[in-house]
Amino acid sequence: MSKYIFVTGGVVSGLGKGIVAASLGRLLKSAGYSVYIEKFDPYMNIDPGTLNPTQHGEVFVTQDGAETDLDLGHYERFINENLTRSSSLTSGKLYQSVLNKERNGDYQGKTVQIIPHVTNEIKDHILATAKESGADILITEIGGTVGDIESQPYLEALRQFSLDVGRENCAFVHVCLLLYMSCSDEFKSKPVQHSVRELQRFGIFPDVVVTRSDKQPPEEIIKKISLFCSVDEHAVVPSTTVKCLYDAPAMLYRNGLYKAISKALSLKNKCDLTEWKKKVATLKIKTPKVRIGIVGKYVSLRDSYISLVEAIKHAGGANLTAVDLKWIDSETVTEANVANKLKDVDGIIIPGGFGERGVEGMIVACKYARMHALPYLGICLGMQVTVIEYARDVLGFKDATSGEFAHTEHTVIDIMPDKKGKKLGGTMRLGSYPCAVKDGTKIKEAYGSNLIEERHRHRYEFNNEYREALENGGLVISGTSPDGHIVETVEVKDHPFFVGVQFHPEFTSRPENANPIFAAFVKAALENVKH
Ligand code: GLN
């Protein structure tokens, strides 16, 4: 039988509740339990796929092709497991399912209501995920903060759920901001008290209160929170700011999170973080240092590149090198300034993106890397840019472009035939697909295999009409779909490292296993360090 942990948030959003949930997963895994994590997002979008990056940050893609909240990326990286679409539930999806059932007549003429129909749907989802995953412990994070109108049905469902499966099989963890006033140098526990009271109003009495603050709070504040919130003193767990994200599990362990959770759920195993800490140590190496330029269009929105940045860090760890990032807004890159902008980097990455803005600057940077033996990795849009640049400069197709931006005589990247004329939401090529890799290529060297699998999220692809011309012109098509039809990766010869991949390798990178293509790219950049 499964045990359940529910993670709620209070006082403000953006507290790193996802990191607490992911860290909890790591602690439990390091204690030998199998763990699964899911996130409930109370907004009405079906998924974050159509949300602007300014609104939502990165869209994380699971192997089975769900477009999900970026917290799922943290979960996968911390627990080193592949999650699925059932790990992500939004109110949009929830209500869609209830309304479909209503139209189907499944409710047999009953009045459809939040309680019990929506709450039952939530409870069924939790049970189904627990069953499907077969995990010892299922962690469920509820997005937003307690007190939001949207999250009320979820809290009611959780309260009922704990009655259904037995309160002893459930632990409620409430993560909230512990206010610190720098002027008087004191912590204020009142907002925490109010937030816990709000949760208690729903009949949920948390087993653990995680207080988020930069610094460690004094003992008397912990005592006060314990007293006023009716939680054991040992179950008030400070979560303080860590330099490296992956230090969070060890910090929370030190502050008593595992002890409090094992008490709440009567867990017997000891947690041993030795292996995890060893891996994390490689991510904190200070020298040698390699500098990677990221030439992208959302560089002012770092949240859009979370998995990318983490994958680069993991690759640094795999090469025992520190990685320094230089963010370059592709909109500002021109033929005139590119040499100057790239003079202090040892390699560049052009990441994924949507829309035309900033693409010309990416093409300029790509050409510079190709001509100057600068290690280069183009990801998704970055791979499409690689093909456009090659067609323009080497083949002389000056008007080469992608169907996403214009239609010219040389639309070398075009919409996938089966995606033509479809709606925007959920119509991309999403999730894991196999890729057959040719011998004697960088991709083969990196992965050491002729068949790899990576995750995708794109609507446009290499246009096969130009395949012969590009190959004759020297572009190496190093990876395709196993039937040879879809071009997945391109490279050029006689270059230390120049690779474009249609997939998003960053989604499968973990601190415990760096993604091979990132590791190979950082290795090439390290060999290129000029000092
Ligand atoms: N906009 C491009 C496409 O839809 C690339 C997508 C991406 O980089 N994720 O194909």
Image (cartoon, grey):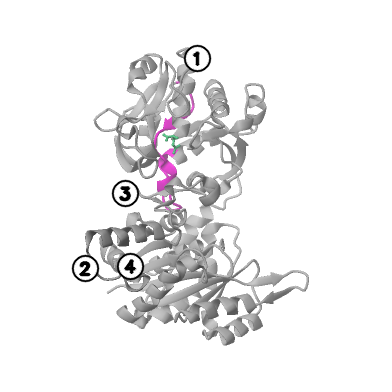
Q: Which residue is mark 1?
A: 398
Q: Which residue is mark 4?
A: 126
Residue positioned 53% across, 56% down in the render? 281
Above-or-below relation of 354 to 160: above
Q: Which residue is mark 3?
A: 64
Residue positioned 41% across, 50% down in the render? 513
Q: To which quarter of the image does residue 141 belong?
A: bottom left
The alpha-carbon separation of the residues under discs 4 and 1 comes to: 55 Å
Q: Three-letter amino acid code at disc 1?
A: Lys
The stretch in magenta equals: 494-517
Quadrant of the image containing the N terminus: bottom left
Above-or-below relation of 303 to 334: below
Compare marks 2 and 4 and give the one earlier in the sequence.
2
Q: Residues within 10 Å of mark 3 (few under 14, many from 20)?
A: some
Residue positioned 37% across, 75% down in the render? 269
Q: Nearer the viewer, residue 109 or 316?
A: 109
Q: Nearer the viewer, residue 198 or 370?
A: 198
Secondary structure type for disc 3? loop
Determine if the C-beta at disc 4 is less than 8 A from ligand 1: no
Disc sitting over residue 108 in the figure: 2
Q: Three-letter amino acid code at disc 2?
A: Gln
Residue positioned 62% across, 75% down in the render? 191
